[in-house]
Amino acid sequence: MNIKSAVKNSFPAFTHRNFTLFWCGQVVSLIGSWMQNAALSWLVYTITNDRLLLSLMTVVQFTPLFFLSLPFGIIVEKYPKRKIIIFTQTMLLIAAFMLFLLIATDNIKYPYILIIVSVIGTVQALDNPARQSFVVEMVEGREHLLNAIALNSAAFNGARLIGPAFAGKVMSVFGAKWCFFFNAVSFLAVLIGLLMMRMEDKPARKNVENPFKEILEGIKYIGKTPKLLYTFMVVAIIPTFCINFNILIPIYTKDILHLKEEAFGMLLSALGLGAL
C-alpha cells in the first residue's frame, strides 16, 4: 500500500482538495493564535499586575461570542461562507498586527488592548459558525464529515500544545511583540488556502425573511429536543466553570512559582498535551 492509499483510507477527508488546503492553513494559523493568546495574558498581567484586569480582558473578548453568535448565524446562512471567512481572517490579521505595532512603538496600554480584544471577540462570533459549517461544503457532504471534524480537533489540540510553548520561548528571547507578529503572518496561510479553493460560492439560503423569529424557533426547538438541550447545557456549563481556569496560569507562574515566560508557555502547553 502506497502513502496516497494509506492517507485515503485513514484520513478520507484529505481526498478533498479544498479541505486539505484549509486544514493545512488552519494548522499554521492555530499555532499563531495560541501564541497570541499566551502572549496576551502574559502581557496584560505584566503591564497591569492586576488579577481583576486580567480577568476583565477575557470577559471583554468572549462577551460578543455569547450575545452575537445567534444573530451572526443568520448572516452565515445568508452569505457565502468562504467569503465570510476571508473577511474574518483578514480582520483577525489586522487586529494581531495592530497589537504588534502598539508594542513595537511603546504605545501599548490596557484600554487599547480591551478595544482590540473586543473587536477580536466580535469577529470570532462570526468566524466560528462560518468555519464550523464550512466543513460540510469542503468535504462535499456527510460521508467524510466525521473524519474532517476529528482532523480539525487534532489540529486545534496540536496547536494548543505547540503554540504556547513556542510563545514562551519567543517572549523570553525576543519579546512578546513577535508572538503577535507571527500570528498576523500565520493568517496568510489560511487566506492563501481559501483563495486557492475551487468551489462555487453560494449561500445556504438566499432569503431570510424574519431573522429574530428564526432565532426564537431555533431556541424553542432546542428546548423541545432533550439530546440537543442536554448537549447545550453541558457546552454552557463546562466553559463557564472549567475551561477558563487557564486565566490563572500567568498569576500562578509569576506570583506562586516565581518563574518567567518560558515556564508560563510550558504550563499552558501541558494543558494542550492532556487534551491531545
Image (cartoon, rainbow, N blue to C red):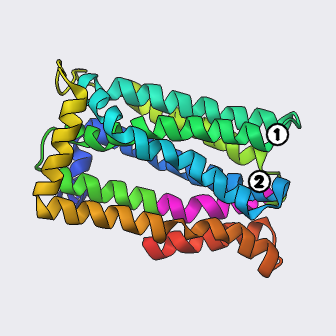
- Cβ–Cβ under 8 Å for marks 1 and 2: yes
Secondary element at image label 2 = helix
User: Residue at left 37%, top 45%?
Assistant: 23
Image x and y of residue 106, in percent: 89, 37
Q: Amino acid at mark 1?
A: Ile
**Image-based side of 60 in relation to 100, left or right:** left
Residue identifier under label 1: 108
Q: Given the current orientation, which residue lies at the most extreme right position?
A: 106
| Kind of residue indicated by mark 2 | Leu
Q: Quadrant of residue 216?
A: top left
**As rendered, which of 215 and 11 lies closer to the eye?**
215
Mark sitting on residue 160: none
Which percent across, then down, holds residue 153? 36, 59
Q: Residue at x 77, y 59 (%)?
A: 45
Residue found 32% across the figure and 39% down from its top: 70
Quadrant in the rendering for residue 162? bottom right
- Whether residue 197 appears in this view of the structure is no
Looking at the picture, how far across and down is residue 51, in whole percent?
74, 64
- Residue 211 in sight: yes
Residue furthest bottom in the image: 257
Q: Nearer the viewer, residue 106 or 54?
A: 54
144 left or right of 70?
Answer: left
Indicate which disc residue 43 carries. 2
Residue 195 percent across, percent down from the top left: 40, 24
Residue 141: which quarter of the image?
A: top left
Predominant secondary structure, magenta span: helix
Magenta span: 158-171
Q: Nearer the viewer, residue 9 or 104?
A: 104
Q: Earlier in the sequence, mark 1 or mark 2?
A: 2
